[in-house]
Amino acid sequence: MPDESPFASFDAALRRALAISTDYIAGLPDRPVSYPVTPDDMARALDEPLPETGCAADAAICDWFSRAEPGIVASPGPRFFGLVNGGATPAALAGDWLASALDQNAVMWLSSPAASHTEQAVLRWLKELFRLPASWAGGMTSGATMANLVGLAAGRQWVGGRLGFDPADTGLGGHPPIHVLSSTEIHASARKALAMLGLGRNSVQTVPAPGGAVDTAALAAALAAIDAPVIVVGNAGEVNTGAFDDLGQIAALCRHHAPGVWLHVDGAFGLFAAISPRSRHLVQGIAAADSVASDAHKWLNVPYDSGFAFVRDGEILRQAMSATAAYIAPQDGRWDPHSHVPEFSRRFRALAAWCALKSLGRTGYREIVERCLDNANAFADWVAAEPRLELLGSSRFNIVCFRLAADAPQADLDARNRQAVTDMQADGRAFTTGTQWDGNAAIRAAFDNWATGPEDVAILIQAVKDILLAD
Ligand SMILES: Cc1ncc(COP(=O)(O)O)c(C=O)c1O
């Protein structure tokens, strides 16, 4: 028998979680970002038979942390430059904890008027922050993949309507194909969303994006060749280099396509350009889109998982997403989240975002965005000045893509760039991730964390010098 019932004390368990969390957070500026653990190491730490009898809740928490700790990546810390991760602000993290304690089901107004209305308030604040029309509908999602799915589902619904059928009701079988156009740099998650929507991940007709941003003349030609309504996916922030499609020009093209266009914009991190006068021009024209997808767990710096989608026409969105049953009948004037997003029962993720927005306000977010841009620029300037490195892509935003560019066969250079990424991850001072750019191996560093400062950029530079430029 356990010493103490697993149900005995919330207090002890929560205090334990608090103690572990505050130690972890206090250590983030200094701890290695990651340790070189293998799947076998993690299996040895965690794979055991299902416990026959339980233990006290705080003991379970302690036990997990001590076993899994080497596999925890300090991605909320200031020296994680991989993928496109944000950290969590104090208010966001506390709000997220509170959401777990309150354990609201944010499915519908009836199950939590507080959660439903908080989500509406967050969506309104986000539209203000990003200067999007107040009339747009939206919903919070688990991330930008699901936000892309929401926008593209609305697009599919709209195109189906133009072609005389209702995709949400009858499916796609037996109907004309739905055309999707984007650049070669469309994010993998948008393709995944298209796969889930039955449109097919390879259904996208892509046009070139030299430097990362779509060639608008090529897009115009591709659009002109389609005598049918089209979904166009614009990319506001390409994941390797941070490049932006010219949304203003794309929107103008779309307006002139007589059969009609649904313009969806993937702004997973790029939408945040709208917050600063320094970068706002990059998303000029976005208000002409029909749907926009973005992430909160990236640059809003709220904990995983959190994203959001906006759709100009709320009725189309509800047609695409709504589910009806007698026991969940809508009530007049009451906003049901589930009619705007894929899930039914869902976490109260709006609370973390509400607390973060309340605590930082517009000014706080502008400062975060500008600090990240300063950090990215400082690193990009160093890369550009270093003769053995090549700065890739055409953009100067929050992602720096680069590679070793010595006078050596390309295959050797690719191997050295790839090895450098692995070695940097094992080294633990600064975490970057690898990619391919123009067909060759490259390294990328993304800057979205509120806590990253010039001292962290200096550590990143030193790590690149020591590991990539050592000989
Ligand atoms: C441009 C873009 N779109 C979509 C996504 C997918 O976002 P998530 O992982 O939050 O689903 C990402 C992730 O990095 C991204 O950079």
Image: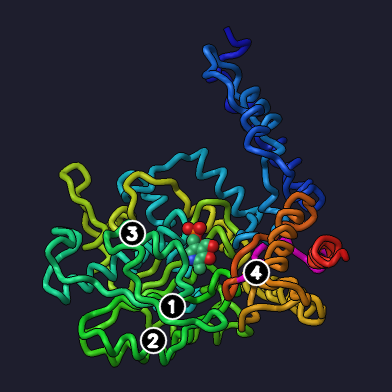
User: Is residue 78 in sight in this rendering?
Assistant: no
The reply to whether callout 1 and callout 2 are in contact (CB within 8 Å) is yes
Q: Position of residue 455 (x, y in %)?
A: 83, 65
Label 4 C-beta lies within 8 Å of the nearest ligand 1 atom: no
| Residue at the image point whose x is 71% and y is 30% from the top | 66
Pick whichever of labels 1 and 3 is earlier in the sequence: 1
Residues under labels 1 and 3: Cα distance? Answer: 17 Å
Q: Earlier in the sequence, mark 2 or mark 3?
A: 3
Residue, disc 2:
219
Q: Which residue is mark 1?
A: 183
Q: Nearer the viewer, residue 16 or 444?
A: 444
Mark number, residue 195: 3
Depicted 120 relative to depicted 373: above or below: above
Q: How many marks?
A: 4
* Amino acid of disc 1: Ser
Instruction: Say few, some or many: other residues with alpha carbon within 10 Å of mark 3 (under 14 / 14 to 19 / 20 or more).
Output: some
Give neighbour class at mark 1: few <14, some 14-19, many 20+ (Cα, 10 Å).
many
Q: Amino acid at mark 2?
A: Leu
CA gap, disc 2 to disc 3?
Answer: 22 Å
Does label 1 or label 2 sit earlier along the sequence? Answer: 1
Determine whether the residue tagged by mark 3 lies in a helix, strand or loop: helix
Rendered location of residue 9, percent (x, y):
59, 22
Mark 3–mark 4 Cα distance, whole angstroms, equals 38 Å
Magenta part of the chain: 440-455
CB at mark 2 closer than 8 A to ligand 1?
Answer: no
Which residue type does callout 3 highlight? Answer: Ala
